[in-house]
Amino acid sequence: MIDTPGMRELGLWDAGDGLDRTFSDVEALAARCRFRDCTHTGEPGCAVAQALETGSLDRARWQSYQKLRTEQDFAADSAGWLAAKEKKFKEISKINKANRSRSSGK
């Protein structure tokens, strides 16, 4: 536990090897999927979905893996994520400005 004023969160940085080792069972299942780019969300021949269905892969373990993988992906491309977020908010700002202009013009 860290009690540092101003620190809001901790994140993963370069945790690829640790994640792969910790969830080697999940990685092995994913490698057995029919398609290499399987998203494990309903594709035919998905070994992960089958393991979840049969109970050989615990759903809570799968959810932990997904959460940590998402955090790792964000850490790997945080600049890209922040740029996309900024672009989205600029678009929202333009829409809001246009709506304000329309409402004040009536």
Image (cartoon, rainbow, N blue to C red):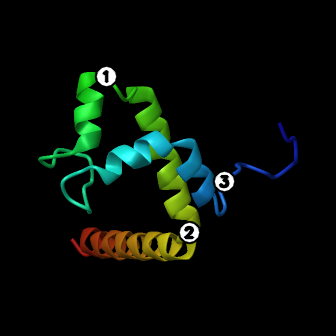
Task: Look at label 2 and name its amino acid.
Answer: Ala
Q: Where does the image place residue 95, in percent across and percent down from the top left?
A: 31, 72
Q: Mark 2 = which residue?
A: 76
Q: Which residue is mark 1?
A: 55
Tell me the quarter of the image containing the N terminus.
top right
Establish if 49 lies above or below 105.
Answer: above
Query: In which image quadrant can residue 55 be found?
Result: top left
**In this view, 20 is above or below 82:** above
Q: Check disc 3: other Cα within 10 Å, few if <14, some if 14-19, many if 20+.
A: few
**Rendered residue at 33%/49% (across/down):** 30
Residue type highlighted by circle 1:
Gly
Q: Is residue 30 left or right of residue 4?
A: left
Dividing the picture into quadrants, the one containing residue 87 is bottom left
**Residue 106 versus residue 46 in the image, above or below:** below
Seen from this angle, which residue lies furthest top? Answer: 55
| Front residue (pair 72, 100) | 72
Q: Residue at (25%, 75%) from the top-left corner?
A: 105
Q: CA distance from mark 3 to mark 2?
A: 11 Å
Q: Residue 44 has which mark?
A: none
Q: Report if the CB atoms under discs 3 and 2 are less than 8 Å apart.
A: no
Q: Dot 3 corresponds to which residue?
A: 11
> Which residue is rendered at x = 17% and y = 44% of the image?
42
